[in-house]
Image (cartoon, rainbow, N blue to C red):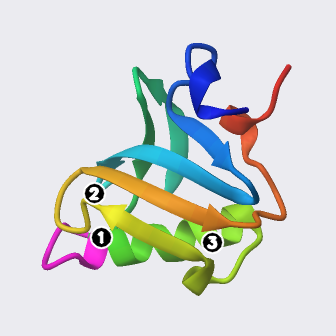
Amino acid sequence: MTRNSAEAEPFFWWEGEILVVNILGRPAASRDAIGKPRGHQLEVSVTTAPRRGRATDHMVRFLAGEFGVAPWAIEVVFGRMNVNKQLRITAPQKLPRPFRRS
């Protein structure tokens, strides 16, 4: 998927081997989970409280497992201290359900 075809999947696009994802973070949740797309963002819940970027750090570790990459392969472009984030995931080995086509 390219950036120009964002109408079908507006929360993510590919830049070569890099997957760019817009995230709506839900800190202090009951469990870590990838939720559903909400407009131009994908909802991702994590159990860690939002203190000094710790929820984002936990989210990166959680998503690394979900995408089959090391945590260092996920770059937080913006939003480390905010619920609105953009991540760049280099060469994901797995794609969770919201990223797969039916």
On the image, numbered disc 2 is attached to which residue? 27
Determine the residue positioned at 50% across, 33% down. 11
The numbered mark, 1 or 2, whose residue comes first in the sequence reads 2
Circle 3 or circle 2, nearest the eye: 3
Q: Residues within 10 Å of mark 3 (few under 14, many from 20)?
A: many
Determine the residue positioned at 82% across, 57% down. 94
Q: Report helix, strand or loop for mark 2.
A: loop
User: For this rendering, which residue is in front, 71 or 1?
Assistant: 1
Q: Amino acid at mark 3?
A: Ala
Residue 10 left/right relative to 90: left
Residue range highlighted in magenta:
49-55
Residue 84 left/right relative to 87: left
The answer to whether any part of residue 31 appears in the image is: no
Q: Magenta stretch: dominant SS?
A: loop
| Distance CA(mark 1)–CA(mark 3) | 14 Å
Q: Residues within 10 Å of mark 2 (few under 14, many from 20)?
A: many
Per the rendering, the mark at residue 55 is 1
Circle 1 or circle 3, nearest the eye: 3
Q: Residue 32: x and y, percent?
A: 49, 58
Per the rendering, the mark at residue 64 is 3
Pointer 1 with pointer 2, Cβ within 8 A: yes
Q: Report helix, strand or loop for mark 3.
A: helix
